Image (cartoon, rainbow, N blue to C red):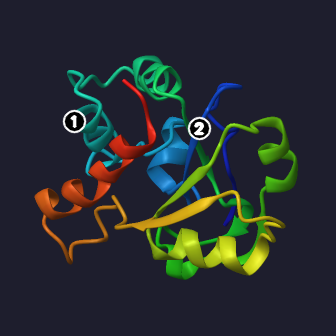
Amino acid sequence: MKSFSFAPIASNDATVLILGTMPGTKSLETQQYYGHAQNNFWRFMFEILNEDFTQDYENKKTLLIKNKIALWDVLQFCERIGSLDSAIKNEVPNDFEQFLRQHPNIKTILFNGQKAAAFFKKHVSVKDNKYQFILLPSTSPANAGKPFESKLNEWKIIREFIKY
């Protein structure tokens, strides 16, 4: 099945970029980043940013924008049956050269899981050392190797890169 990623959630003054790999089946159905009810991404963001959790997608996007956090996926297109990143084939990356040029305040790039980092490394060439890259555990329900609290504690590193 052919899959296409979403447009980024980003303001011009974003300082942090969080990258997933590619929207899963449920996210594609809902047309929302991290649309699977068991994915912990949004719960982590609300907890880390000290806000009350909501299911409202517009409020979720606003939370990121007001904290200068951009959200996107490494891949623009791929072929995949199901939602597992291990099933991705014939992938095409998003245009990071243009995106990072348009968002010059981004200094920290966080990867939501190992596959996002691996695809970025495979397809994207960053020409200078102005970025700090951080690998975080996947928020996907398929990543059952670590408990919720352990993953949340690793994700709290975001606080170091944003101003409240």
Residue 80 x/y as whole percent = 62, 72
Looking at the image, tell me whether mark 1 or mark 2 is earlier in sequence order. 2
Q: Which of 152 and 127 is in front in this view?
A: 127
| Residue 95 in sight | no
Q: Which residue is at a point 15% across and 58% down the rendered structure image?
A: 148
Residue 60 is marked as: none
Q: Which residue is at a point 45% across and 43% down the rendered structure image?
A: 161
For the N terminus, which image quadrant?
bottom right
Q: Nearer the viewer, residue 94 or 35?
A: 94
Label 1 element class: helix
- Tell me: 23 left or right of 144: right
Q: Name the residue under label 1.
A: 47
Marks 1 and 2, Cα distance to the nearest angstrom? 19 Å
Q: Is 54 situated above or below 107? A: above
- Tell me: 99 left or right of 27: right
Label 1: how many residues lie within 10 Å, few (<14), some (14-19) or many (20+)?
Answer: few
Q: Which residue is at a point 28% across and 62% down the rendered structure image?
A: 141
Label 2 element class: loop
Q: In which quarter of the image is residue 113?
A: bottom left
Q: Which residue is at a point 53% across and 24% down the rendered structure image?
A: 65
Residue 54 x/y as whole percent = 27, 22
Do the residues bearing badges 1 and 2 touch, measured as CB atoms within 8 Å?
Answer: no
| Three-letter code for the amino acid on which mark 1 is drawn | Glu
Q: Nearer the viewer, residue 50 or 40?
A: 50
Residue 15 is marked as: 2
| Three-letter code for the amino acid on which mark 2 is drawn | Thr
Q: Nearer the viewer, residue 3 or 64?
A: 64
Label 2: how many residues lie within 10 Å, few (<14), some (14-19) or many (20+)?
Answer: many
For the C terminus, which image quadrant?
top left
Q: Is 21 situated above or below 122? A: above
